[in-house]
Image (cartoon, rainbow, N blue to C red):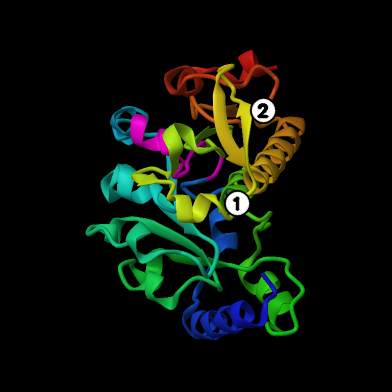
């Protein structure tokens, strides 16, 4: 993350974003926001998202009070008409994640480090910037940005930032989908198989998944699972139930919170105690 070549890219993106940033993510945290106090469905781009796409595209229509936020490649799985917002965090954001037509009606939540091209398909009035509490000498205005725009924790994965955003919006509950954090069916993401050229450079391991079956993951994704489980713990402590409806993978939140999507959508808050 702090390699000189990466820092150079991050700094270039940061400067361009700072010139165009207008709307602080703090506006989304206000009680008057359409995101405040709702059920949040955070859709990641794990392999299982592809399996659940048909059920996910009905959520916005059948459950109008549910906030649907696409993370990375989940936008391609669902299509812009089926999501309310799209969140992006880092310089590795890929144009194929946010290139579909029709993004004028989708809110963008972006850090200052994403490629500047991400702003083009979204309306400026529907684009919100957030800082990250990262101490970096190459971004000297980070403290000023936190005050002006607000911040989301990075946590090494954009899904962690999305959970923090739901927490800040006092979500009534949070549902996670597509958080396999494993190479389900030998795929790295929805629509993408894991090439051997990539796999051989990772510390892959065979583990037991949430269904009691064998799956493959790596140490990086195990850390991400631990981070998300920790974030879920604190959400629960503050009265926000968190459900994992991915259906596959290694993310085990405990509390009996691994539920199919439809069960999680209809679960009452009092049932989560």
Question: Which x, y percent locates residue 21?
Answer: 50, 77
- How far across and down, in percent of the image, does residue 218 sit? 62, 43
Please identify the residue farthest to the left as the structure is shown: 101
Q: Is residue 130 left or right of residue 83?
A: right
Question: Where residue 233 appears, x then y in whole percent?
Answer: 74, 33
- Image quarter of the C terminus: top right
Which residue does the numbered mark 2 point to in the structure image? 253
Q: Element under label 1? A: loop
Q: Which residues are magenta?
A: 36-51
Looking at the rendered image, the disc whose residue lies closer to the viewer, 2 or 1, is 1
Quarter of the figure that contains the N terminus: bottom right
Answer whether residue 40 is magenta in the image: yes
Residue 165 image offset from top left, x and y in percent: 60, 50
Q: Is residue 256 left or right of residue 19?
A: right
Callout 2 crowding tier (Cα within 10 Å): few <14, some 14–19, many ≥20: many
Mark count: 2
User: Residue 242 vs residue 61: left or right?
Assistant: right
Question: Which disc, if any, is residue 202?
Answer: 1
**Residue 18 shows up from this direction:** yes
Check residue 258 in the rendering and tell me which mark sits there, or answer none: none
Q: Quadrant of residue 5?
A: bottom right
Return the residue nearer the eye: 125 or 131. Answer: 131
User: Who comes first in sequence, dot 2 or dot 1?
Assistant: 1
């Amino acid at each position: 993350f702090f390699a000189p070549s990466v820092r150079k890219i991050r700094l270039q993106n940061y400067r361009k974003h700072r010139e165009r940033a207008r709307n602080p993510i703090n506006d989304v945290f206000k009680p008057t926001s359409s995101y405040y106090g709702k059920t949040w469905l955070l859709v990641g781009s794990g392999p299982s998202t592809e399996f659940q796409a048909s059920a996910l595209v009905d959520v916005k229509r059948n459950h109008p009070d549910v906030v649907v936020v696409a993370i990375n490649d989940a936008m391609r799985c669902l299509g812009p008409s089926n999501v309310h917002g799209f969140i992006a965090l880092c310089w590795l954001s890929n144009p194929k994640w946010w290139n579909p037509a029709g993004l004028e009606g989708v809110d963008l939540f972006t850090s200052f480090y994403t490629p500047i091209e991400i702003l083009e398909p979204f309306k400026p009035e529907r684009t919100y910037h957030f800082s990250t509490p990262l101490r970096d000498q190459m971004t000297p205005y980070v403290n000023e940005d936190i005050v002006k725009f607000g911040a989301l924790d990075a946590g090494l994965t954009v899904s962690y930032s999305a959970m923090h955003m739901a927490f800040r919006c006092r979500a009534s509950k949070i549902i996670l989908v597509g958080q396999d954090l494993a190479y389900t069916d030998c795929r790295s993401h929805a629509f993408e198989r894991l090439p051997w050229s990539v796999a051989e450079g990772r510390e892959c391991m065979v583990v037991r998944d949430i269904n009691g079956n064998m799956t493959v993951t790596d140490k990086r994704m195990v850390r991400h699972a631990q981070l998300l489980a920790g974030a879920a713990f604190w959400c629960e402590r503050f009265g926000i139930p968190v459900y994992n409806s991915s259906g596959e993978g290694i993310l085990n939140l405990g509390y009996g919170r691994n539920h199919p999507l439809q069960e999680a959508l209809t679960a009452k808050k009092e049932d989560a105690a």
